[in-house]
Amino acid sequence: MCMALKQFPASSLLTMFQRLMLASLAILFFAACTEGYPTEDELSVNPLDLNRSQRLQAMNELGKDAHPEMTWTYRALPGCTLQISVSGLESVKKTFRLQMSGAGVEIGFNKAERIYGVQVQPRQGPSLDERTVLLSKTWVDAVEMLNLVRSFQIGCETSAATMSMNRTDLS
């Protein structure tokens, strides 16, 4: 009587080495997924939790670091006006003012220069031209500035509405 051993085709069996490699790769894959989002993509501040001076401070911090060759500074003026000063590339400091009440704020991207820009389009005031209020190499900085500018708007519009309500209460 002849006993034949049942043999599986070599292609259907994984060698011990292959099993170890697959297990190692699976462990590495799942370990990488448990760390969450990278911290460099997190916004550093929640602008709605800040008061007006804290927002301006955050805007100025971002403005000095967002672009390697330019520095942006921001100052609040009466009447929901934001003053922006830019120095850098042309080594001439440019200062302009934007009426922020009702202004549109958006992010643009220049593919040729690979740079993000935050633009403000005033709805009232002496100049209705769209102006860039920040240039940044990173999308995260642009989004953070967009949120800071919008919260600046909300803050000054809310305080203006509160002041006008208080005036009508006094009359």
Image (tube, rainbow, N blue to C red):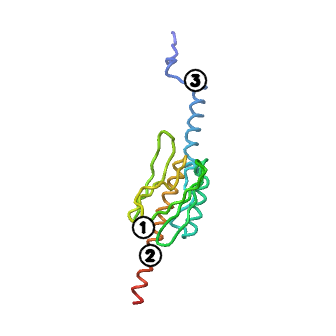
Task: Decide: is 116 above or below 99.
Answer: above
Residue name at image x 48 percent, y 67 percent: 81
Q: Could you classify mark 3 by the number of other residues whose Cα lies within 10 Å: few (under 14), some (14-19), or many (20 or more)?
A: few
Residue name at image x 44 percent, y 65 percent: 100
Q: Mark 2 and mark 1 in contact? Answer it, CB < 8 Å.
A: yes
Q: Quadrant of residue 64?
A: bottom right
Q: Residue furthest top?
A: 1
Q: Could you classify mark 2 by the number of other residues whose Cα lies within 10 Å: few (under 14), some (14-19), or many (20 or more)?
A: some
Which of 78 and 108 lies nearest the eye of the viewer? 78
Identify the secondary structure beneath mark 1. loop
Cα distance in 3D space between marks 2 and 3: 74 Å
What residue does disc 1 label? 101
Mark 1 or 3, which is nearer the eye? Answer: 1
What residue does disc 2 label? 160
| Residue 59 % position (x, y) | 56, 60
What residue does disc 3 label? 15
Q: Quadrant of residue 25?
A: top right
Task: Give amino acid for label 2.
Answer: Ala
Which of 90 and 171 lies nearest the eye of the viewer? 90
Task: Decide: is 125 above or below 71.
Answer: below
Say which label, 1 or 3, has the lower sequence index: 3
Work out which quarter of the rendered image holds the C terminus and state it. Answer: bottom left
Cα distance in 3D space between marks 1 and 3: 70 Å
Which of 66 and 75 lies nearest the eye of the viewer? 75
Is 125 situated left or right of 41 in this image? left
| Residue 26 % position (x, y) | 55, 36
Say which label, 2 or 1, has the lower sequence index: 1
Which of 14 and 124 lies nearest the eye of the viewer? 124
Task: Decide: is 97 above or below 141.
Answer: below
Q: Residue furthest front?
A: 92
